[in-house]
Image (cartoon, rainbow, N blue to C red):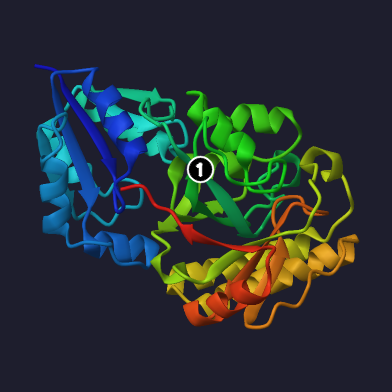
């Protein structure tokens, strides 16, 4: 019997995880899924899991492709599952292409004769609808030539969803439509976006879903994610009246140091689930957009932050509100404004 081992946090289970489990299970006869305990998650990420460990274990055990679930307690970063792995001695250790602990894991595999195997992140085969996305801060740091070591990109998948037949948003409008279109057609749009001279953040968050913090770099690497529930009732997008062209403005001069600073602040807002702190990051990023030459956005009463989405110079703009009542009042007075909600596939 060939035993296959995978590890992760699996804090918010989504369709991409199910696809990964299916593909990993196909390489053997018995799939073991390990996940980091709440203690380990706090030790390494300084965050608590969304559900108790026992609940997460029961949820994973209930999936038909999983044969065994183990909770790991090791404190070695990247190898919290080492003790369980050495005990089980599987035939395969399966990782995704963005695995950042490859060296350590290959050494661990060598100790038991297991095969270290990389699977590409393929879109789920059953997607008929997809989210679009809004970006909060760190834009352009997902473009490989502008990447900053230690920098971040902060964004969020949104609903209402789109499909190949139903697309209720303006197009070429800064909401990552090309990433959604690629997913709906069964493709991973990361490489095609990079080939256009822009970044990977759109297809990455649309595939991942949720409120995400990514590490700046040549390829998507998730730092951490939140289900985004603290943003419910607090986001709206404003149609500026004109389409925009991200590749066309990619080489405009801009203050990347301040963009990186804005993302660091927004990251803290996500980590603390603090909309005020997130708004600080958004407003700092918007200041860099104004310095770049974009027209000032209207001051909508009740909003606490605003910025152009995507490359800016048109398209949609994101507005944040401290409370749902403030958004509701703004909607009544501004016809170009429409509500959007955080979307996290579970």
With 274 as the anchor, is 337 left or right in this view? right
Residue 273 image position (x, y, % from top left): 44, 73
Q: How many marks?
A: 1
The quadrant in which the N terminus is found is top left
Residue at horizontal 80 percent and vertical 42 percent from the top:
245
Q: Which residue is mark 1?
A: 206
Q: Nearer the viewer, residue 308 or 20?
A: 308
Q: Is residue 323 visible?
A: no
Q: Nearer the viewer, residue 273 or 108?
A: 273
Residue 144 image position (x, y, % from top left): 70, 40
Seen in the picture, residue 189 relative to 207 is either above or below; the reply is above
Residue at horizontal 84 percent and vertical 69 percent from the top:
296
Seen in the picture, residue 98 relative to 244 is either above or below; the reply is above
Residue at horizontal 78 percent and vertical 54 percent from the top:
312
Q: Assess disc 1: are there few (<14), some (14-19) or many (≥20) residues with their C-alpha within 10 Å of its C-alpha.
A: many
Residue at horizontal 35 percent and vertical 23 percent from the top:
117
Seen in the picture, residue 68 relative to 222 is either above or below; the reply is above
Residue 268 image position (x, y, % from top left): 52, 71
Residue 128 image position (x, y, % from top left): 42, 31
Seen in the picture, residue 246 relative to 237 is either above or below; the reply is above
């Amino acid at each position: 019997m060939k035993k296959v081992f995978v590890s992760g946090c699996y804090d918010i289970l989504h369709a991409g995880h199910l696809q990964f489990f299916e593909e990993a299970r196909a390489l053997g006869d018995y799939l073991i899924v390990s996940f980091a305990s709440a203690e380990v998650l706090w030790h390494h990420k300084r965050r608590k899991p969304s559900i108790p460990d026992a609940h997460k274990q029961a949820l994973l055990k209930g999936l038909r492709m999983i044969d065994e679930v183990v909770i790991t307690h090791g404190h070695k970063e990247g190898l919290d599952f080492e003790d369980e792995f050495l005990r089980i001695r599987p035939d395969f250790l399966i990782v995704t292409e963005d695995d950042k602990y490859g060296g350590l894991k290959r050494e661990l595999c060598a100790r038991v004769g297991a095969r270290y195997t990389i699977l590409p992140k393929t879109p789920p085969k059953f997607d008929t609808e997809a989210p679009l996305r809004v970006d909060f801060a760190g834009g352009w740091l997902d473009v490989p030539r502008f990447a900053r070591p230690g920098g971040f990109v902060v964004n969020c998948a949104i609903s209402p969803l789109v499909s190949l037949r139903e697309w209720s948003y303006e197009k070429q409008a800064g909401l990552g439509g090309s990433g959604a279109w690629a997913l709906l057609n069964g493709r991973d749009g990361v490489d095609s976006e990079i080939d256009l001279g822009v970044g990977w953040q759109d297809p990455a968050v649309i595939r991942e879903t949720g409120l995400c913090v990514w590490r700046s770099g040549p390829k998507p690497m998730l730092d951490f994610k939140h289900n985004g529930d603290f943003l419910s009732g607090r986001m709206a997008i404003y149609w500026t009246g004109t389409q925009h062209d991200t590749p066309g403005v990619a080489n405009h001069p801009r203050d990347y140091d301040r963009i990186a600073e804005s993302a660091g602040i927004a990251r803290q807002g996500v980590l603390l689930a603090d909309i005020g702190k997130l708004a600080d990051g958004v407003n700092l990023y918007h200041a860099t957009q104004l310095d770049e030459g974009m027209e000032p956005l209207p001051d909508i009463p009740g909003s606490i932050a605003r910025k152009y989405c995507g490359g800016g110079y048109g398209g949609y703009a994101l507005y944040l509100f401290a409370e749902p009542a403030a958004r509701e009042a703004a909607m009544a007075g501004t016809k170009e404004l429409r509500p959007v909600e955080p979307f996290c596939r579970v």
